[in-house]
Image (cartoon, rainbow, N blue to C red):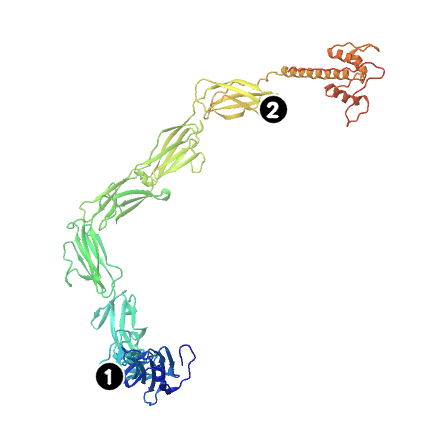
């Protein structure tokens, strides 16, 4: 038991009633005023129900005690006791449901069937300062919902006419129970209640069962709580097959059967009601051809006509039925009717013919002319089977009249028709002539297309004699080329029934006729085009055209010099890069057909360009190395030119040898140039030069022949410059040597004496300069020898000259100043030499 969240106290059973005065808290108890109430309540299993202790508007009891007496038992059982917020539950209340007590009201959730019985509430109710004892008895009825029913048929499948019953059963549910039934067809549809079959009871009787009872059955059970429906149960009533019914598409009934047109799709359907569905077998003339309810004959043929039987079989009942029809196949003649118009009675009448052979039955044909009634009754004149002919007078028929042939056949719902219109072609016949290969025969062709009937053509000669046989539209006459056909005339006559007078065309066989210019002129180096064209009616004989050059050689394709361009009636000859005078002359154009040959000359004149002006060499001189020459020239006179050419050759030649040929030293020189530097010469060879002016391919008169002149002598300036330079170098060297000897008097005494003429001992040298006088004066005063200036050029030279005298010297040390020789009183003389070079 529960009491708030504290552990439950031990349950004392019914003895708790003696504790009610103590629980009143010392308040006076009016036992004589106790009230007793009783009522009924209904609950549903699994749901919730509330049981109140007293009227709903009354105050809740201060103390309440609930007990339960099961239905059919006399001993009550404690359920719950409560005082305010303190509540205690008796053990075993779970069999009633989930029990809770709040404010004196007992609530049963998830109600169980065991809770059906008598609940007693005892409570102390506060009233006017005292406690009143109250009793309330609640008779609780627990209802059980209906469970899902299920249906059990006496048989899942039964033959038609047998007795069948379906029973609806429920597992639980509070009675009274009611039942209802719904029936649904096998292929769906609305559910309906079977009428007159006891559909309100738990058992549905189908006696006797028929095919309409086949389908789904649903049972619905209900009570005062709810209603539930069962899952559908299928009841299959087996029956059939009934007598088959054959349907033919397209529907075309005949006496004793059906008919269809050949190449038509025929669908045979057989229906024999049966359950299970019938198995269908089709027989053609007693032989099985198909299994299935529908037999489709695609593009039925005439051999498929005959009797067709449909067998329907019920495999469950092992029963069968059959039905037979006769199918006739009509087929029209092949293709469509053909209409033609032929001339008859020597081109005076027209025979209209209509043919459409074959078919079953044969097609009915009849001709209908303009302004005639097209709908005629059968049996009238002009109606026939397969073929129909009508003669129409040509003189009485207007040009452009139309006639129709109407055909009817059972296999053709819309029938068929063909027609022709009688008319004369416009214009007149055309004549042409052509030669066969090798010109062995000449074929004359006369043609005039169109017309109905076709125009009849025949050939005649100029004397009116008939040549060959008449022919429609085209008449061909073949003649042998024996040399007598040239100039002969032939006539083609055309006749038509709707034309009163015959038409004709004439043809004369003639030798080919050519047309070309008599002379064509072109400048040298250009292209000359010689055109040759055929004219006249002879072109229809297919003449062969050829060109011949001035040497009577035939010009053939592929030659580099010539180019041929040919059309149906013309041939052009192009002479490339015309040369003078080799390409000038008479070219001949010839044409040959089966009756003769024609020739036409064309003169080609190749003209040269005008001569350019003459040229004179104004300067021709060797360069210093004699491997090049400098050439200058000038032009004389007026004239057009496109360039210059310089030629050379050797002038000296051995005896008895001819002069060497001129060779081109420079070509393609611009027309505005007047000089040229030419190299690649042998200095040992003497050359001669000349210059020519060129106008396209025409060269003018060459200039006078000249040999190069020698270059002018230019050695004097070079020699003079070399001499001056040598003198300057020698003067500088001499002055340097004198200066060195003067500074090194003691080292080079002999040279010094030789240059300066020294006297004996005690004699002084003449002083030539102020510096010498100063040196002499200083020498007498100084006790030691004077040291030379090491920076002077002479000192450097003396230092370098010392080793040449055989005296040892250290190259790593500076040269020491030379001292005076022993016994000599002469001091060293410092000499300064200034050299000025004038360029």
Q: Quadrant of residue 158?
A: bottom left
Left or right, 748 with respect to 15, comes to right
Using the image, tell me which numbered label, if any, was put on residue 404.
Answer: none
Residue 638 rendering spot, x and y as whole percentages = 43, 18
Left or right, 381 with respect to 43, comes to left
Q: Is residue 475 above or below residue 826?
A: below
Q: Residue furthest right?
A: 823
Quadrant including the N terminus: bottom left
Using the image, tell me which numbered label, if any, was put on residue 198.
Answer: 1
Residue 145 shows in this picture: no
Say which of 242 and 230 sits in front. Answer: 230
Q: Is residue 447 above or below residue 141?
A: above
Q: Is residue 786 above or below residue 30?
A: above
Q: Residue at x 36, y 77 (%)?
A: 85
Q: Residue at x 25, y 44 (%)?
A: 429
Circle 2 residues within 10 Å: few <14, some 14–19, many ≥20: few
Q: Residue furthest bottom?
A: 74
Say which of 146 and 681 sits in front. Answer: 146
Residue 676 rendering spot, x and y as whole percentages = 53, 22
Residue 43 rendering spot, x and y as whole percentages = 30, 80
Say which of 362 and 461 sits in front. Answer: 362
Quadrant including the C terminus: top right
Using the image, tell me which numbered label, if any, was put on residue 682.
Answer: 2
Q: Quadrant of residue 723?
A: top right
Residue 51 rendering spot, x and y as whole percentages = 31, 80
Left or right, 736 with respect to 238, comes to right
Query: Which of disc 1 and disc 2 is earlier in sequence?
Result: 1
Label 2–label 1 contact, CB within 8 A: no
Residue 6 shows in this picture: yes
């Amino acid at each position: 038991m529960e009491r708030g969240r504290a552990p439950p106290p031990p349950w004392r059973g019914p003895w708790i009633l003696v504790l009610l005065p103590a629980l009143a808290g010392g308040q006076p108890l009016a036992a004589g005023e106790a009230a007793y109430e009783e009522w009924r309540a209904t609950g549903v299993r699994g749901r919730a129900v509330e049981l109140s202790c007293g009227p709903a508007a009354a105050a809740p009891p201060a103390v309440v005690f609930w007990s339960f007496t099961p239905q059919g038992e006399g001993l009550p059982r404690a359920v719950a006791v409560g005082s305010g917020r303190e509540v205690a539950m008796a053990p075993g209340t779970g069999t009633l449901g989930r029990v809770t007590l709040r404010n004196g009201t007992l609530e049963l959730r998830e109600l169980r069937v065991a809770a059906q019985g008598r609940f007693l509430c005892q409570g102390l109710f506060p009233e006017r300062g005292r406690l009143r004892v109250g009793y309330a008895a609640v008779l609780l009825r627990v209802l059980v919902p209906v469970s899902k029913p299920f249906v059990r048929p006496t048989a899942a499948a039964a033959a038609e006419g047998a007795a069948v019953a379906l029973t609806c059963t429920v597992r639980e549910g509070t009675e009274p129970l009611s039942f209802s039934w719904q029936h649904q067809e096998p292929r769906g549809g609305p559910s309906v209640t079977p009428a007159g079959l006891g559909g309100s009871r738990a058992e549905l009787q189908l006696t006797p069962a028929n095919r309409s009872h086949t389908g789904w059955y649903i049972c619905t059970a209900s009570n005062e709580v709810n209603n539930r429906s069962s899952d559908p149960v299928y009841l299959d009533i087996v029956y059939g097959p009934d007598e088959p019914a054959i349907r033919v598409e397209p529907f075309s009934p005949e006496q004793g059967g059906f008919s269809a047109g050949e190449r038509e799709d025929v669908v045979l359907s057989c229906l024999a009601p049966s359950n299970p569905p019938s198995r269908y077998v089709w027989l053609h003339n007693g032989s099985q051809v198909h299994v299935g309810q529908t037999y489709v004959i695609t593009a039925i043929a005439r051999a498929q006509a005959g009797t067709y039987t449909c067998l329907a079989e019920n495999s469950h009942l092992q029963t069968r039925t059959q039905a037979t029809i006769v199918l006739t196949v009509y087929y029209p003649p092949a293709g469509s009717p053909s209409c033609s118009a032929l001339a008859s009675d020597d081109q005076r009448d027209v025979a209209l013919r209509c043919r459409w052979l074959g078919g079953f039955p044969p097609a009915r044909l009849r001709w209908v002319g303009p302004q005639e009634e097209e709908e005629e009754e059968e049996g009238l004149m002009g109606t026939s089977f397969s073929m129909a002919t009508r003669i129409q007078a040509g003189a009485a028929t207007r040009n452009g009249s139309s006639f129709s042939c109407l055909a009817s056949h059972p296999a053709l719902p819309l029938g068929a028709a063909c027609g022709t219109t009688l008319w004369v072609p416009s214009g007149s016949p055309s004549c042409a002539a052509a030669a066969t290969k090798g010109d062995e025969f000449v074929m004359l062709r006369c043609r005039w297309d169109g017309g109905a009937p076709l125009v009849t053509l025949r050939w005649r000669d100029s004397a009116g004699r008939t040549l060959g046989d008449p022919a429609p539209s085209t008449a061909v006459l073949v003649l042998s080329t024996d040399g007598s056909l040239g100039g002969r005339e032939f006539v083609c006559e055309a006749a038509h029934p709707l034309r009163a007078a015959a038409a004709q065309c004439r043809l004369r066989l003639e030798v080919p006729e050519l047309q070309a210019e008599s002379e064509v002129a072109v400048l040298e180096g250009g292209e000359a085009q010689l055109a040759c064209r055929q004219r006249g009616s002879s072109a229809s004989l297919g003449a062969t055209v050829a060109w011949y050059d001035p040497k009577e050689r035939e010009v053939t394709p592929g030659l580099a010099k010539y180019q041929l361009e040919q059309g149906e009636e013309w041939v052009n000859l192009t002479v490339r890069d015309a040369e003078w005078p080799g390409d000038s002359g008479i070219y001949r154009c010839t044409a040959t057909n089966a009756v003769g040959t024609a020739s036409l000359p064309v003169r080609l004149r190749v003209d040269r360009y005008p001569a350019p002006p003459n040229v004179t060499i104004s300067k021709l001189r060797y360069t210093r190395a004699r491997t090049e020459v400098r050439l200058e020239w000038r032009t004389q006179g007026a004239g057009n030119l496109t360039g210059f050419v310089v030629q050379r050759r050797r002038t000296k030649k051995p005896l008895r040898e001819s002069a060497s040929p001129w060779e081109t030293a420079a070509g393609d020189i611009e027309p505005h140039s007047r000089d040229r530097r030419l190299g690649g010469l042998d200095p040992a060879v003497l050359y001669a030069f000349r210059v020519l002016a060129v106008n396209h391919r025409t060269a003018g008169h060459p200039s006078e022949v000249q040999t190069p002149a020698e270059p002018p002598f230019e050695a004097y300036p070079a020699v003079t410059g070399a001499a001056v330079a040598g003198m300057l170098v020698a003067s500088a060297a001499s002055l340097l040597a004198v200066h060195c000897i003067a500074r090194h008097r003691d080292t080079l005494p002999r040279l010094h004496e030789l240059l300066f003429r020294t006297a004996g001992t005690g004699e002084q040298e003449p002083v030539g300069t102020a510096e010498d006088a100063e040196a002499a004066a200083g020498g007498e005063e100084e006790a030691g020898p004077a040291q030379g200036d090491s920076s002077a050029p002479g000192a450097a030279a003396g230092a370098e000259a010392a080793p040449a005298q055989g005296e040892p010297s250290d190259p790593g040390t500076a040269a020491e100043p030379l001292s005076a020789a022993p016994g000599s009183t002469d001091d060293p003389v410092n000499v300064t030499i200034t050299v000025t070079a004038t360029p």
